[in-house]
Image (cartoon, rainbow, N blue to C red):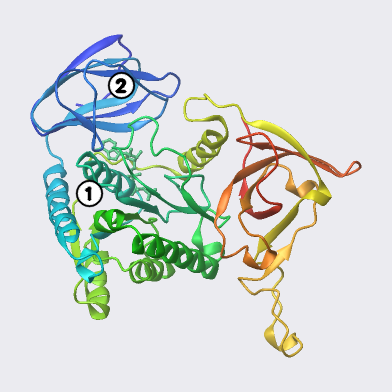
Amino acid sequence: ASGGSTSAIKQVKLDKECEIRIEVGNETPLRLRLLSGTAEIFGAELPPEIWLTFPPRHKFAVFTWYGATIEMDGETESDYTADETPMVSYVNVHAILEGRRNRARASPPDSNSSQGPRVIVVGPTDSGKSTLSRMLLSWAAKQGWKPTFVDLDVGQGFITIPGSIAATPIELPIDPVEGVPLEMPLVYFYGHVTPSNNVDLYKVLVKELADILERQFAGNAESRAAGMVINTMGWIEGVGYELIQHAITTFNANVVLVLDQEKLFSMLKKDVLKNNPNVDVVKLQKSGGVVSRSNKFRQRTRSFRIREYFYGPGNDLSPHANIANFSDLSIYRIGGGPQAPHSALPIGAKSVADPLRLAPVNINRDLLHVVLAVSFAKEPEQIISSNVAGFIYVTDVDIQRKKITYLAPSPGDLPSKFLIMGTLTWLET
Ligand code: ATP
């Protein structure tokens, strides 16, 4: 039975292999704790007796392998217990990956077999890709591995703000409330929330990220054996399908987990195995608990993610307002510009529609409310191939005095004057 609750503290007893699915109410947070037994949230075990606080609208499940009693305090939009979940099939995948990690660790470091599983999770929107990625990573981390989490979803970034692709080692099970720690992930800024804005740029950045991880793995047997889990976006038709194939080959994925879709599974099985017969393409069921999210909801989570970057997950950080002279900053945009037919260009000239063209941006009021990435590039030419240090948010542009005011997560000078602008904006609320 589904339905919201408004009562105060309530106890819920969960039988083995059952979960309670919770949508926190719109207004107030929900507190929850484990009273007895053992339970986990998306692969991360709950500490006994300690209250955890989940923000409004948060959607999650508490699952138990052997039975548990939990206590909840606060309003929910809905909460219900389910005894049918795909968790056993998910944990079986984990067991197979675990075997491969152990084999990789036992192999001579220079051999091919020292590479652990490179798992890519694909499926339509709202099929539970991020959630499955998260469980596989947390279960591996619990067993002492440090798998690399790669997030290629520019729409609903899990590691950092939207519009980016990123990677980070996962050293501990992922915190059910705070998510992935934001310390020092490897981030490339694409600048848009859908790959269709600039497919070529998206592919180039995916390649950059894959190359850099490949180099890191070469020198680190431990993370090589632990392997990676790659989360993708829900765009699976047409160009979206091409991008999935591109990610599989670029990252040399050897396990493809397809959630929910028979058609996608059979297409990928055919196309992927044609290129590389050693890849395992596995079909997995979607959990009935995955919540569909409207475009409006997605927009809201995007904006929430940006807020979180500057203010911290629990509103516990205070960003710094800084002022810079126009002349201190060099802002660039990648690609775009008005379309000019190739025939109209002088021979040898680069089309302004070149998707990888770097164009300086004039500073004006258009920058207001824009989120900019701070590149590690030393020269403009390196911008596309460089990862980013972080982000700033433009809160004021004073044309007369030629000064920009911006929020940054830390005080002091920016690590570089090269900034990247896309179409990502944010309205602070
Ligand atoms: P996207 O379309 O953004 O790629 P996705 O396929 O990655 O989505 P998730 O983000 O994993 O989907 O899941 C969608 C939402 O459903 C999330 O808010 C997640 O926390 C929630 N969810 C997933 N599994 C469960 C479950 N078993 N019970 C309750 N909520 C769940």
For the residue pair 222 and 410, the one nearer the viewer reads as 222
Residue at left offset 36%, top offset 19%: 30
Residue at left offset 60%, top offset 45%: 391
Residue 385 seen in the figure? yes
> With 6 as the anchor, is 284 left or right in this view?
left
SS category of the residue bearing label 1 = loop
Residue at left offset 68%, top offset 85%: 342
Residue type, numbered disc 2: Gly
Residue type, numbered disc 1: Lys
In which quadrant of the rendered view does residue 214 lie?
A: bottom left
Q: Residue 121 appears at what percent x and percent y? A: 29, 56
> With 147 as the anchor, is 90 left or right in this view?
left
Q: Quadrant of the C terminus?
A: top right
Marks 1/2: CA–CA distance: 24 Å
Q: Residue 60 appears at what percent x and percent y? A: 30, 33
For the residue pair 153 and 276, the one nearer the viewer reads as 276
In which quadrant of the rendered view does residue 4 lie?
A: top left
Residue holding disc 1? 286
In the rendered image, the vertical position of residue 52 relative to residue 423, given as above or below: above
Residue holding disc 2? 4
Q: Residue 129 appears at what percent x and percent y? A: 31, 50
